[in-house]
Amino acid sequence: MNRHRVSAGVVLVAFLMLVAGCQAPAVPSTDGPDDPDPEAVFEAAFVHAEDLEAVSGERTTVVTAGDETQAERVAVTERPYAEYRSEVLESERADREGALYVSNAAGSWWYDPTANTVSVYEANESYESEAVRMARADVAADRLEYYDLEYRGTETVADREAHVLDVTAKDEAVTDGVSVLVGDTEFVYALETVDPADELEVTEQTVWIDAEYDYPLKERVVSEDVDGEPYEFTERFETVIFNDVDEGTSAFDPPENATADDLE
């Protein structure tokens, strides 16, 4: 199940989005002939290490369009591949603060605290994490046909060693859209200068993947609109903990007075 709602007009290029910070990036270390296979690193961003059971942390997102920049901080917990929870802790858009998204094998819930509404999607049938894992492996294999990959060594993200991978589309047909595997595409279109009807062409994309658990920790995407106006989206885990998440990650009990809206 895709855990992201996508704004109208956005064409997704399946990859990741995790990130952000305003500090200058460190210079990657390089190991020469002992570098890992970039295709293996790419695939691992979709299908993580076998011993990865859970992830928790806080990530920041920064979106820049022209002279306008907006940022937000989100708490994330996840049990790959079928349980996920995110809550907006701080945002320059007041209507997003406290927004909650929860997903598990039974369905998904989006809670809007400003409107006190819950959007509910119930799955027609429950699914297993292994089924999602296999589907993600298929997506990774398919994406390899469309990208050129360059391994750029390692950097430190959230006090973790991370492989750095540059991703370049081979064909113009796959450069349209905002690339997302982890993150929130709707936040891109929160900026007043970004029109959801516009197609954004991805011109640069880099991803940082945890060297131990193969989990994406950061992503930077640079895009242009039809007029050549640049947009930059960076998402980054500031803190992250692996394999130490409380039970009930995907549990959700909406307020009793909240209005529910079922999504088909």
Image (spheres, rainbow, N blue to C red):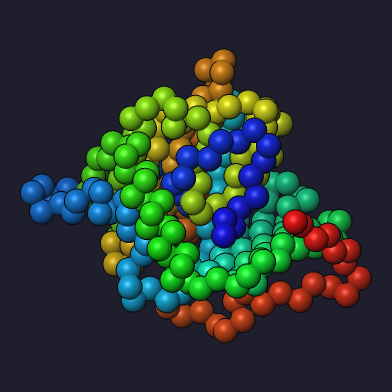
Would residue 210 be seen by someone viewing this image from the given angle?
no
Position of 177 relative to 247 (above/below): above
Q: Which of 219 and 43 is in front in this view?
A: 43
Residue farthest toward the bottom in the current orientation of the protein: 247
Residue farthest toward the top in the current orientation of the protein: 227
Position of 245 relative to 100 (above/below): below
Q: Position of residue 188 (x, y in %)?
A: 61, 40
- Residue in the picture at 60% in, 36% down: 10
- Residue in the picture at 33% in, 62% down: 214
- Residue in the picture at 60% in, 72% down: 126
Image side of residue 264 versus residue 198, left or right: right
Q: Where is residue 203 in the image (x, y as percent from the top left)?
A: 42, 28
Residue farthest toward the front in the current orientation of the protein: 124
Would residue 108 be seen by someone viewing this image from the given angle?
yes
Image side of residue 168 versus residue 221, left or right: left
| Image quarter hosting the C terminus | bottom right
Q: Quadrant of residue 106?
A: bottom right
| Image quarter hosting the N terminus | bottom right
Residue farthest toward the left in the current orientation of the protein: 33
Q: Where is residue 254 in the image (x, y as percent from the top left)?
A: 80, 72
Q: Nearer the viewer, residue 244 or 170?
A: 170
Image side of residue 161 versus residue 136, left or right: left
Q: Nearer the viewer, residue 22 or 154?
A: 154
- Residue in the picture at 63% in, 26% down: 198
Q: Where is residue 202 in the image (x, y as percent from the top left)?
A: 46, 31
Image side of residue 252 versus residue 232, left or right: right
The image shows a total of numbered marks equal to 0
